[in-house]
Each structure stands twice: as structure tokens, then as C-alpha cells.
Image (spheres, coloured by chain):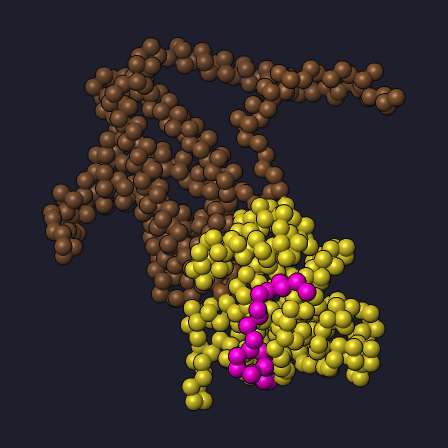
Amino acid sequence: MSNLTKGIAPSTSGHPMVRAEGVHKSFGLAHILKGIDLEVNPREVFCLIGPSGSGKSTFLRCINHLEKISAGRLYVDGDLVGYRQKGDKLYELKETEVAAQRRDIGMVFQRFNLFPHMTALENVMEAPVQVKREAKAVARERAQRLLDRVGLGDRTGHYPAQLSGGQQQRVAIARALAMEPKLMLFDEPTSALDPELVGEVLDVMRDLAEDGMTMVVVTHEMGFAREVGDSLVFMDDGVVVESGHPREVLTNPQHERTKSFLSKVL
Amino acid sequence: MPPEQIKAIPVRHYGRWVAGAAVVAILVLIGIAFSNAKINYGIIPDYVKDGTILSGAWHTLYISVLAMVLGLVLGVILAVMRMSSNPVTSTVAWFYVWLFRGTPVLVQLLLWYNISLVFPVLNLGFYKNDMNAVMTPFLAALLGLGLNEAAYMSEIVRAGIQSVDEGQTEASHALGMTRSQTLRRVVLPQAMRMIVPPTGNEYINMLKTSSLAYVVQFSELMKRATDISSTSLAVAEMFFVASIWYLMLTSVFSVGQYYLERHYARGSTRNLPPTPLQRLRKNLRMFGSFRRPEVAR
């Protein structure tokens, strides 16, 4: 419907967009992820739900290497995240190589994390100009178009502090889209919003899904997961408890833990 | 029919009158003491405008600005080194701060001035000269004051950088920005809000600390004033002259600092408060166009 992104780059390789094989993550003694296996296909909206502390946000942050995984393998579009494999040895990627990997992966945070010293337009222009060395005029034109698409074409000169939470989060989505990513990660994008502002952000995400963007969404919005999601995973205590089509899992959960979680949030 | 406005008798603050009277009395006593002192106040205005003093004030201004710039640049570099994950650079930065903050600036000035005791000849390969010819009073003052300042500035900058929300770094990393891009474009501009006020403090300190540069024969304001007092015997008068200049310099700088802080506050509040000048203009306009509204009865 709305062409939020012009021609999303199809996965060139025929790989799944994200593949996790036995991913573990520990912070000191805390064992957060205890062997996650999953696959996210291109153009899929993949929802992660679960109680807080279940490791879903941590897993999301591993996908763009904001967190280093402790064991297992994690691939994005066929490439190992954060490492290079030669034979059976793993080599850490250099900082610039990690940055290059992250260019193609957009991320939206629970607390927006807009740059407060820049206007909405400057926020969206920043990465293309700095990272891709794009001409300012080109970046500005795209930023204006993206802000129009998320319904904020008249707010380009506003600083984040002058915008509502919902507006800030929409700017944050536009900022991530400006890098023309092949994958978008959403870390509880509506959890910090007033209830009446949740809808405007979900609408933008729905448009994005209809455009065929591959999305991994950590969320507590079961309605969104049911309507927009293609797959859903319920995580608890660092493991995948149950997965399947959102409607299946949400209406007919098989596992006791899923049942008790859903009975509390639905 | 508007509601009746409350007209109450305000609380009386008798304590303020007592305190005010006490302050006036003390000021009068101090004034009497000073006017009875053997000080020839009449010559002060002339010396304030004296050419020797003027050039001394100018030297004070520019050595303090240059030393501050040196301190600021080096301070940022040291702060970044200190927070680096590279153990060598962070240890070097820690050692620098330990050394330069831990020794008196007077000693550091004298050491730079006498550096030829250690390095009699400066040999950079492409440039070779006698160290005594290179190490002018100006250069000794600049290095002594600037390198000392860098140690203090690096701690201020480090505190400023650490005050920026971690989410900012994560967001810019997630966009594919490198660590140096993140620092330059995202973290430092926000850290400036925290850095500017204590830096202003440091600069005012620097304006006055630069008077120590007289020990390396740098002819700043204090050296000029004492030179004059030793020939004219107008000792106290010259202290007044120097103080007047230091006060003027720090006052002018305080105004500049106000606008600098305002600049870096953009985006942090919804609407910046008006500057004193804007407020004045607005008030003048109000007097022009409005009459005072009548008090409701």
C-alpha cells in the first residue's frame, strides 16, 4: 500500500534472513540464552513474545551484534554475525567490519534513542550522510520522503523533546529505514508509549510489513502479532518453548507455560 | 461577572531589613577603612588605561585563550584515551593526569622554561636549534599552563562523555556508525552540555592562574603591574589596576559562556528561555503597546 521502502532488496542468496543455531549468551554467571534455534525467512514478520527476563530482547540484540553470543552460530542473510570462519577457527571481526554488517540491519528501540541534539530531519539524515557518505541533498530528500510516509512530514524541524512518544518512535523507524536495511529489528517498540499512542506506531509497522520488509519484533502487542505476524515464538527462561503461526499459538497454545503466560496478557 | 480577586496582606519579612542594614553597615566600615588607607586612588584610572598595562592585559587574554585551547584539545584526546579499551593508551592517559595534576603548575612552568637543562638542543630531524632559543617565555607559559590544564580538562570531558545515555551509543552503532563517528557526531555534542559549565570555570581560573607566568618572564598583566609598582612605588594602586582588569575580563567571558551554554542546550528543553537581551526588548515592547490592565474589583 504505501511504499515505505522503495524496492526492498530481496535476499540474494536464498538463505534464511536470520538463522540461529544453538545460540547461548551469558552475562557473567547469568545464563540468559540457553540454546536458541530458529529461522526467519525473507519478507517474514517474526514475533518474539515471552515474560520479561526470558531473553527475547537479548536475542534480538545479538542479531546485530550489540551483544556477543557466548556459544552457537548466528547468521544474517548467510553471513556469520560478528565473526569470520576459516576452517574450524573463528576470527573476531574488526570494528569497521561489524559496523558494515550493521548497516543492513535497522533497529528500533523501546526508548526510541533519537539523537536529542538533532531535529527529526537531521536524525533521519545522519546515518546515510555519515556512514554511506551520501550527498546531503540526496539524504535530505529521502529523509523528507520517509518522514512524510510515517505521517510526520510537517514535523521535520522539531527536536525529539518537542515530539510525543509516538511521533518520536515513528521518527526512529524512519531513521532506521533511511539506511535501506534488509532486516528490521524492533525491541518492544510500543512498550514506552501511552496506550493511545501505540496505534500510530503499529500502523507504520503494519505498512512496513505489507511492503515485504523482513521484521523481527519483540512485542507485548498480541493483537499485532496475530494480525501481522507470520511466525511467532514464545520464549521463557532463555529457551524457545513454543513456536508456530501466531494464530495457532495464541489461540491454541500447546505448552503449559505458554498457556499460563497468555492467560495473563490476553 | 469575574470572580473577586484575592487581595491579601503579604507576609512581612522583617529579617530581610535587619540583614540589609547589617550589610550596609559593614560596607560603610570597610569603605571608611579603605578611604583612610595610604592609597592614591586618583592615579588608578590613568594606570588602567596605561599602554603597558593594556598590553599586559592583552597578553593575559591571549595566553589564557591559547593555553585553554591546548588544554581542551589535549583534554578530549586524553579522555578518549582513558576510556579506550586499549590498555596501553588508557594507562598512558591515567599516568599523564596523575603527573600533571599532582605537581604544582608553578613547578611545571619553571621546568618548561629550564627544559634546556635536559634537552640542550632541539632536534626534530628537519628542524634543529638551541633549546634556549626555542623555549621563549611565551612557549614556556603556553606549555606550562596548557599541559597542566589538559589534565583537568580530561577529567571534565570524561565525566561529560559518561553522562550521555548508553542508548545513544547503541542507536548509532545499530545504524552502522563506527566508534569515532559515534563519539564525534552523537556523544560529544551531547556531552558538551555537561562539559561547558565546568570548562567556563576552568577558563576563569586560567585567566588568573596565567599570572604565574611572570616566573618565566612572560609579560602578562600581573608582571606589568608589579614592574610598574617597583619603580613608581604605587604598590597597592597597581593591585587595584590589575584586579580591575581581571574582573573586566572574567565578566566579559561570563556573558560569552551564557550564550555558549544556551547553544549546547538546544534540543534538551522544549523551548529555550529568552536571553536577558530578548527579555529586555520584550519588556520595552510591552510598555509601548499595552497599558497596564485595570485591577478587577
Q: Is residue B257 above or below residue A186?
A: above
The prevailing secondary structure element of the residues shown in magenta is loop
Instruction: Decide which of B206, A52 is in the foreground and name it.
Output: A52
Residue A175 visible, this orientation: yes
Magenta span includes A15: yes
> Which range is magenta?
A1-22
The chain shown in brown is which?
A: B
Instruction: Decide which of B46, B280 is in the foreground and name it.
Output: B280
Residue appearing at x 34%, y 60% in the figure: B92
Instruction: Decide which of B3, A11 is in the foreground and name it.
Output: A11
Magenta span includes B109: no
Residue B166 visible, this orientation: no
The chain shown in yellow is which?
A: A
Figure quadrant of residue B123 = bottom left
Residue appearing at x 39%, y 51% in the figure: B76
Q: Quadrant of the N terminus of chain A?
A: bottom right
x%, y% of residue B171? Answer: 55, 61
Q: Is residue B277 above or below residue A257?
A: above
Residue appearing at x 53%, y 51% in the figure: A122
